[in-house]
Image (cartoon, rainbow, N blue to C red):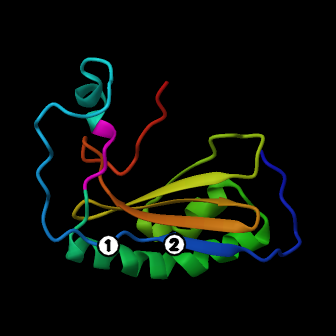
Amino acid sequence: MPPTTNQAAPCQVEENVPQPVQRFAAQPTNGGGPDIAPHHVENNGWKQRKPLNAEATAKGRDTIARVSPILKRVCETGDFSVDTTRKALAELRPQVEQPYPDQRFLGFTITLDGGTCVLGDLKPGLVRIFLDGTNGEGSCYTPKTH
């Protein structure tokens, strides 16, 4: 379990919200592009996030406005435990993980209806929140790969 501290520390919150897409652009099919291994694109296509329309972006912004002060308070307590973060965001049913158990760093994923994902992480002094679409498998959570 990572160390905690009882001292409140200021935390900065960074929010990354992309502009909504108006329509989807066709991908070039002329065969041009980088020199990559055969089937690289199709093997890794599931990792590509889908763009968000205006409605999904608005829903994500509303959620970010709701969770940002909550996560800032969690960060400022110095308690970077999975349980504390999960409890703070309980009504949104987040997936919270600590990829590096020896470090004070957490990642979280919140899945909203309609393919909107609120993703982010917390570490001492910083909360980062990102808005994105689902991956190619229709999930907000992308597991670690080798």
Q: Which residue is mark 2?
A: 15
Q: Which residue is mark 1?
A: 19
Q: Left or right: 115 with respect to 102? A: left
Q: Position of residue 62 (x, y in %)?
A: 38, 81
Residue beneath the point at 30% across and 79% down = 58
* Residues shaded magenta: 46-50
Tell me, yes or no, whether the highlighted magenta stretch contains residue 110: no
Q: Position of residue 5 (x, y in %)?
A: 87, 63
Give the class, few, some or many, for how many residues have Cα within 10 Å of label 1's Cα (few <14, many ≥20). few
Q: Secondary structure at mark 2?
A: strand
Q: Amino acid type of disc 2?
A: Glu
Q: Position of residue 129 (x, y in %)?
A: 52, 66
Residue beneath the point at 49% across and 34% down = 144
**Magenta residues, dominant SS class:** loop
Residue beneath the point at 11% across and 35% down = 30
Q: Secondary structure at mark 1?
A: loop
Q: Nearer the viewer, mark 2 or mark 1?
A: 1
Q: Left or right: 88 with respect to 144? A: right
Q: Assign the N terminus to one quadrant of the image.
A: top right
Residue beneath the point at 47% across and 82% down = 65
Give the class, few, some or many, for how many residues have Cα within 10 Å of label 2's Cα (few <14, many ≥20). some
**CA distance separating discs 2 and 1:** 13 Å
Number of numbered labels in the structure image: 2
Q: Amino acid type of disc 1?
A: Gln
Name which quarter of the figure residue 7 lies in: bottom right
Q: Nearer the viewer, residue 41 or 81?
A: 41
